[in-house]
Image: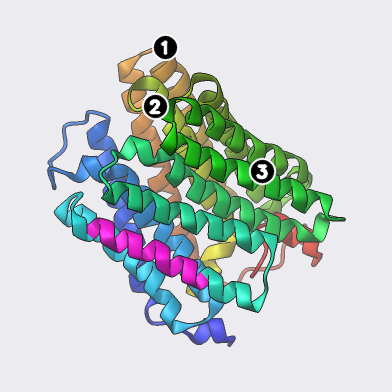
Amino acid sequence: MTRSGQVGAGLRIPLLAAGGIALLAGLYAALLLLGFRLPMLRPALADVHGPVMVLGFAGTLIALERAVALGARWALAAPGAAGAGGLTLIVAGPGLPGKLLLATGGVLLLAVYRALWRRQPGTALLAQAAGAFSWYAATLLWLAGLPIPDLVPWLAAFLIATIAGERLELAHVALTGPRPQRWFLAALAALIAGATAATLWPTVGAHLFGLGVLAVVAWLAVFDVARHTIHARGLPRYVAAGLLTGYAWLAFAGLLWTGAGQTAAGARYDATAHAVFLGFTMSMIFAHAPVILPAVLRRPLPYRPVLYAPLLLLHGSLLVRVILGDGAGWEAVWRWAGAANVAAVLAFLACAVVLVVYGRRRPVRPHPSRPGSRHVAAGAGGTR
């Protein structure tokens, strides 16, 4: 077993469980925000829906995966702080303790990236560190009293920069020459500059942030190997389908920011935020789970075609929500399409649990469409 496989093996399940609780609480809050009459477990749960989902759930998973990659026990403090922060928000609401824990998680994740940089510096790692900085910036602004809608550019930048950095890391095998990395750095700089401008000059800055988002999408559309592996079979094709549809939603959000500018409420805010955090981020999680979860849990999550079902439900229901709900103003359609979004996430979670249990009982046979080339591995999410 590798060093990363030995370090903190007993803590991974509790940390992953903390992220899972944040996910379930965030989905419950989503149903409350959609107007469903459900028991109010916590009066403030709906008020922390965004930070719980982005930092309590996705932040814990990202920090846990990076801690495992580093292979140092202290690095588990980053997902620990993020998970504890998410749980504190769920129990106590948007108070100082939860915000401080989430801010601490961002700082600790930056420390993890610093340790990884000493081991092997690179542009991809720089992008992921920029994502951790965006996480920290969002929590600082929240502590300073800014409302959650004003944090959305930084929360989005955290996820976009982190995922784009991981895709660059996996695409290295297919890239030749320095030009792709130079264009990537330019797009990353535009994204972070746009998030900064959106805070300093909200009216104009939101347009600039949209341009930064579109710059990252343009790089992914040109250089990500998913555009080649979509023609493969099995896991590589499934991963590519999740990636490319996610990029389409990110482009849509970028266009909304670029054209319409700042928004803090209403249909356009709903469409923009969920294009990023559902259409893009959840699609990335669905796509990478068969590779990332086994690396974290040391248990296989075998690919099966049933994984397409929640992916299709996610994108289909989100399309209905945005076009007929947000666009046409059909409130009932918006509400039930939002419920279908929640059902898609829960369906994927159920599929993942069943496949992990199934994978432990029956070894996965090599798929004939999975040659041992690094190019195909990169398209399927790669290994670390």
Residue 67 colored in magenta in the image: no
Instruction: Please report whichever mark, 2 or 3, sits nearer to the chain's N-terminal start.
Output: 3
Image coords of residue 296 (percent x, y):
50, 71
Residue in the foreground of this view, choosing between 200 and 173: 200
Q: Vertically, is 351 above or below 64?
A: above
Q: Residue at x 28, y 65 (%)?
A: 84
Q: Secondary structure at mark 3?
A: helix
Q: Which residue is mark 1?
A: 328
Q: Which residue is mark 3?
A: 187
The type of residue carrying mark 1 is Ala
- Mark 1 vs 2: CB contact within 8 A: no
The type of residue carrying mark 3 is Ala
Classify the position of the N terminus by image quarter: bottom right
Residue in the foreground of this view, choosing between 183 and 291: 183
Q: Give the left or right position of residue 329, taking residue 237 as reference.
A: left
Q: Vertically, is 6 above or below 87?
A: below
Secondary structure character of the magenta stretch overall: helix
Q: Which residue is mark 2?
A: 269
Q: Residues within 10 Å of mark 3 (few under 14, many from 20)?
A: many
Q: Residues within 10 Å of mark 2 (few under 14, many from 20)?
A: some
- Mark 2 vs 3: CB contact within 8 A: no
Classify the position of the C terminus by image quarter: bottom right
Q: Quadrant of residue 193?
A: top right
